[in-house]
Image (spheres, rainbow, N blue to C red):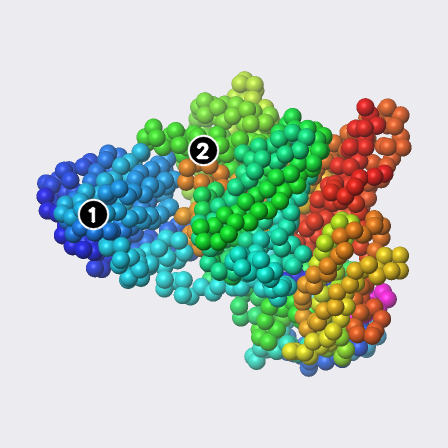
Amino acid sequence: MNAVAAVILLLDFGTPKSPVMANWTQVVRTADGAGPWVGTPAQEAFEKVWPRSNPNASTGREDPPPVYTNDLLCDGITGAQPAALRVELPAGDYELWFAAGSPAPVRGQVFDFTVGAGAGSAGVQIQGQYWLETRRFRFHAAGGATDVAITPKSKYALLGMAIYPAAEADRVAREALDEHEKSIYQLPPDLLAKWKLLATPDPVGQMPAIPAADRARGYLVHQRSYLENIYPETVPYAAEISPTLQAFASLGEYEPLNFAVYALKDLHGCRVNVSDLRGPGVIPGAAVDVKLVQFANSRLNYTVTGSYKVVPDYLRPFDTADIPANRNQRFWLTVHVPNDAAGGMYSGEATLTAADAPAATVPIRLRVLPIRLQADPDKSYGIYYRDPLDEASRAQDDSSKAFYEHQARLQAEDMNAHGTVLNVPLSVWIGVPKDPAQPLGLSYDWTGLEARVARCRKYGYNGPFIVSLNTGGLYERHMKGERFGSHLRGAKPCPDAFVTEMQAMVAYIEAGRKERGLPEFLYYPVDEPGTTPDQVGFMVQCLQGIRAGGGKTYVTADPTHEPFDPMRPLVDVWCTQPFLPTHDVVTADMQQSGVRYWCYPNHINGENDHTTVAGARFTYGFGFWRSGFVTLIPWIYGWTVGNPFNNLDGSSADFFNRPGPDGTVWPVPMWEAYREGYDDYRYVYTCGQLIAQAKKAGKTKEAAAAQAVLDEVWRAIEVKPKYKLDSDVWGYREFDLRRWQIAREILHLQGALR
Amino acid sequence: MRTSMLVLLCGAALSAADDGVEPTVLPEFVDAQAWYTAECTVSFDPQHKTERGDGAIHLHIPIDHTTGEPAYPIGWPRAGLAPKTHFDWSRYDLFSFMLYTETSRDKLPATTLGLILSMPDRSNEYHLDLPARKGEWVKVTVPIEDLGNPKDIARVQWFISESNYKHLDTVDFYLADLTLGRYTRPTFLTFEPLERLVAGDAKYLPVTVHLAGVKEGESVAATVLVRQAGKIVAEVPTSMQRGKHRVVLPLPGKLPAGPAELAVRFAGGADAAKAPIVVVRGPFEEAGR
């Protein structure tokens, strides 16, 4: 075994034939003990070079790669057993940097491992493919042979490693590591140079006078409504400097509070602690979740490349945070009011401490209302969802399986805590022979689907369930192997046999469903069909087949588009992006024909804008109420391509909730705003229920007064198909004032009914 | 993309935005030969005219879901201006025109006609869905300030999406009085409180203002105020430059519940713009009913 002797070690892991980064040393797995490995650890090498442009047959476009590879990042070494590298180092202080993850396709695998040397170590948890990370730590070498230990909990995947004197850290970073950091967390340097960073100008523009005490301390504390985005350079309002955080909430409600720090000098090691909130009772500080709002590079739209801006993106847990001078850092607090809290005013504080600046105390006032909010059983909040259980089912080791199952449970609980039930699209995928001369031979193992339905029921949803089918397989079978492509790009009407077999497939599934006592299915043959006559004609065939098989149909399309008219008699559930048709048309149609109107408001789910927080709350609350629709089911709970925290890599941006490396949910402000909208509608519904009770109890004056408030709020809604931009909806603080007006009526009605 | 606009129905009372506007009509605005087309025809029609009497650019669009571009038979018929030397409209405050619509349909679809102003940087593209009305003139006004880069306008395009219409429909749009306007005196294109409902204990009220008629680099003194029952209860002097800003008006933190009026005036003048607001008791004030 030969030890590597050098002061600066740059090690590139891979196969014997894979590319080696210039000026780095190739390290491969050897069977004969050659190389720096201690012994002959069980390992595999991998390589995947991604070209900059990748054809997408479904869309007909060229896509960027899911991860940008270079000679260092395209290859690596993986293993499930502990391993060690032995290197020769003079005595001294060192820094070790490593890049980890898999650029090659891999499903159901969590890479969870630690790299350690001396007393230093760093761990990394990476879920699946195309997600690369780097870590670094410092250690002291006694001099001589030094072992670098790789300790997997599941498996490791190492791409490269650098060991260098700590004193050389800046130079090594500049000369050898920064390009890889950029490739992983932004873009390869040559590509990044071509992208344009756009500014978000502040509408106020001019910094207010800074109080002397804040100047001396080195930072301002300020706040805005959480519905209003704070950007790195947002200028504080003078009246919001040194704020008191105030909110009201009902029993069991979650309520956001926030404040921001505008650093007047670099701040390091900032922490936020929240005290107990004291009033008629005690709401423990532990009931207040604290996260920071992470700024991130954001594309201008889902797949658009070439420009980006820095926006507040996701909320993440933290121990400490550093804040550069002349920038904001927002902290997001979520209070969970206990179900049995006593109503009244509670007070406490958030304390900000920094390693290099005096602390600041931010008072908190929370008014707890003695109200138990009711949910409308006729409204449902679902969401499209990439279920971690799919990864769990593919897991190659117990650790990965357990991780994904744990993650799935955390996400389902998170959905419920946000008012969303597990109304998520499912799939009954039945393979069909390509040759139409062969019989269909329908066969399906119901075990997995039954488990999924049971889980959905556990997390609050009893159907009807959206179920997608193998429409593509049937199409290929009858169209000589052709595919219809994304959004039916290339679809043509099929022979009658297609309809007959669609009917047979649905009839088979329906029989199985009924036999197992499963709730109603809504058959979802194709997502977002196009509007050409051929595309609509094919959709009509699909829907005819489903109906003939005894199934109900679910279509994601705007029913006000006239080219879809031929489909109209065949649709049981329209799921449309805007709130169209209007309230009166929707409610009348649902009453007369039994059709249901659902909405998938992707315009406030983040695929083209990470900042539509106010629009998200309005859509989920007062807008939903005003629309007459019965279900909201946006796409999607979380969407990531490549590194989930790098929005610039991959064919599309990452958006909405992100997977914390430990399986926890890292939410986005829009998701929190969904919950606030859900709560807004619960206030409306609760008030309506109490009005009805009050009328029955003869409390007509109180009922009329409350109804007048609800009517006034109804009239204050400027009806729009989409509530997206801040300019589409009420002013930020108006939301809570409207909610308060309704809450006050609830309190009056409760008092009158006692 | 930016999408704000001012829309005035012909015949509505003139707003402050219509006073003191110095109009400019570019030659291309009345010359159909200068327009490009795709899947439609453009001509100049002297018969369709408004009070100004110049006639109109006529877009005639026969909807056909079977022809057009091979990959997109249901496409986007469009017409507009794409001058070799890009337009520099930065000296102006408004781009406006009148729109009249005729169609073979009983009524127009929900989305009828769109306007795009393109600049070389796509992130500055300005897009507007136009509120066409069958058999009526509608005025459309686009604040130049809302264009990301008004110095470099590569294309001004009107278009429809054929998917919003039925096969064999016809639709005719008449664009008259295409004008670039410049205000000759300070004028508010926008004067809006960020919130129309205000808590009595609120300490401030942000106001969006969009000021035209002021030269680049110059500013005017103004006072933003709140009035209740005829009495000024809050005011802040400020200095405004041309363009869109946010003014943060401090409030006394104890306004009585009820209607109020937000206003702005220039030095020594009457109210230059107003907006109603309503003050309500918030959750942290003393309750009472």
Point out which mark residue A151 bears.
Answer: none
Residue carrying label 1? A141
The local secondary structure at tag 1 comes to: strand
Q: Amino acid at mark 1?
A: Ala
Q: Residue at x 40, y 65 (%)?
A: A193
Q: Nearer the viewer, mark 1 or mark 2?
A: 1
Specify the subunit that label 2 lies on: A
Picture residue at 52% right of the left edge, 23% below the top: A454
Give how far across and how far down residue A537 sits, in percent. Answer: 59, 44
Residue situated furthest bottom in the rendering: B27
Q: Is residue B16 magenta?
A: yes
Q: Residues within 10 Å of mark 2 (few under 14, many from 20)?
A: many
Chain part drawn in magenta: B7-17
Q: Is residue A367 above or below residue A92?
A: above
Q: Work out whether B178 lies above or below A633.
A: below
Q: Please say if A243 is above or below B145.
A: above
| Amino acid of disc 2 | Gln
Rendering coords of residue A71 (x, y %): 26, 55
* Quadrant of the drawing holding the N terminus of chain A: top left
The numbered mark at residue A407 is 2
Q: Residue sitting at 80 percent across and 35 percent down?
A: A745
Foreground of the two, B87 or A86: A86
Position of A63 with respect to B35 (left or right) is: left
The reply to whether dot 1 and dot 2 touch (C-beta < 8 Å) is: no
